[in-house]
Image (tube, rainbow, N blue to C red):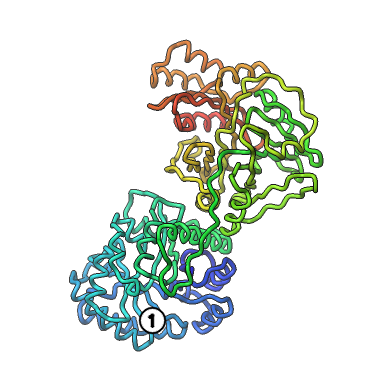
Amino acid sequence: MRTSVATVCLSGTLVEKMHACAAAGFDGIEVFEPDLVASDHSPEEVRALAARLGLTLDLYQPFRDFEGVTEEQLEDNLRRAEAKLALMQRLGIDLMLVCSNVATASVDSDEVSAAQLRRLGELAQRYDARIAFEALAWGRHVDDYRRSWRIVELADHPAVGLCLDSFHILSRGHDPAAIEEIPGERIFFLQLADAPDLSMDVLSWSRHHRLFPGEGSFDLAGFVAHVLRTGYDGPLSLEVFNDTFRQTDVRRTATHALRSLVWLEDAAAAQVAEPPAGSAGWRRLTPAPAPTGFDFVEVKGEDTGEVEVLLDQLGFRFRGRHRTKPVRLWTAGDARVVLNEQQARDQVPHVAAVGFDVADPRAAAARAGELMAPRVHRRTYATELPLDAIAAPDGTEVFLCVSPAGADAPWVEEFEGAAQAVASPLDGARLDHVNLAQPWADFDEAVLFYTSVLGLDAETGTKVAGPRGLVRSQVMRTADGAVRLPLNVAPAATEGLAQHVAVACDDVVAVARRARERGTRFLPVPANYYDDLVARYGLADDVVAELRDLDLLYERDAEGEFVHFYTRTVGEVFLEVVERRGRYDGYGATNAPIRLAAQGRT
């Protein structure tokens, strides 16, 4: 299907937005009236630019507070409308969005609204234009798409149809199933936006917190499927009001926006049997199952020696140096950590890459390409295994690997000079989760990236109180927990958050004792924390004494227990060792403020 985007979604001038939309690959745009009014380009110049860029101008919006008014007001509204219809003719746009009236003095009558829209339709017809009537979620009387459809039916004019907007319908909790009762040819336009699940007035929610599809809590795939079943064959268009997107780089945001539509079209098409008759068909993505686990984590820096000492103290085994690159490999059970000092001048140690085990790397890479994920290229010699890789929004490199169950990854053979194996409490370890700190501007894009490209699910987001403010956190994961990827955003007043790698083991106490004996400096936990543990859980004195002695943290829920500890930060990364007991499935959320406060003191 054709794709479109409202210019209100993007930063910059109207001309900059048009260039960005064309570069991203959109078919068309909705012209947001304030963008045109502020532009120094005439309507004719905008029309010519769109033609040169290969963009269609699909909709002019918004026209407000037209229907449900007195006869005197109607005459003035028709005057306003005619001026805009003449402007649209200069632009070459034949569809105008008319929002339901929000004024307190409006008339609550379907018959009055329909008659007035019919007059507007007659006027629009003289300009070879049409009217798409939309029920605003905060409309004074018309705030439900089912009522706006009744009014359009009563208007009974070929130039008057509906605009359906997912936010206005889903934010009010209206059932979209009745959309299928509307003839597809009467739906003139479709606007799409996702949103987080928030408890606030719907107008503020709409103006500041809409998201691109796949980033919020709405079932947009189901919503679009209802619309497609009507036979609607117009564009899928985005209308996203969001404070972040209107500040970020316009070209990057346009690509981000199109990625969301490509993903949504594929997800919705999977629920519908056939494309509408006469349509160009649906764009489908290459199927690629979600990852089955972590393959490796790469820590990169000019000098990773301190991380190497830490891994050794914790019980990792040195597996050798890469035969052609300044890269070293350390493993513990199935957990693999790569230390990379190549092209890392002036960089402190940080998580630079994450490798995921996938069933079909080629299919996963093809899907990533279809979703416009940037490819990562690393020099590979003829004797080395090439690995497909893409870049996440924050620059983290994501490798698509395949490792046989119960065996080393094939690329491990490229490392030489392994040390003799020594028994360690970490011998049965595995990577439990990798926590990636995100720049504030990348957070929502990262959620969409890991959802659409890797097929991870987004858990309900949380906020954790730290000494410098609230840390926003969103866990991306597979259903079975084989891959867990928490994404965090630091408070605005801070310089950022360190990233960390969590390793799961069967006996965290034994790991902690060995590491302590070998000189590991744990993140210190205050005595007040252990006093609170006694009050919260009623733990036995000897249990608390052991936790206190080893700086271990503890959490319990109805499913099981979680015992873990943190190392001190090296550069921009630290390690966590965890033990999950029973069916505990969390991350020790009640202990996060303790960690943040302790890190702030060290």
- Callout 1 environment at 10 Å: few (<14), some (14 to 19), or many (20+)? some
Residue 468 at what x, y percent from top left?
A: 51, 38
Side of 350 relative to 43 (left or right): right
Q: Quadrant of the C terminus?
A: top right
Residue 300 location, x and y as percent? 70, 40
Above or below residue 255? Residue 79 is: below
For image coordinates 32% across by 60% down, the residue present is 169
Give 112 or 600, whichever is nearer the viewer: 112
Query: Could you say which is closer to the camera, residue 262 or residue 203?
Result: 262
**Location of residue 565 (image quadrant):** top right
Q: Nearer the viewer, residue 231 or 86?
A: 231
Residue 394 falls left or right of residue 81: right
Amino acid of disc 1: Lys
The image quarter in which residue 45 lies: bottom right
Task: Kindly identify which residue carries mark 1.
Answer: 84
| Residue at the outermost top position | 542
In this view, 91 is above or below 15? below
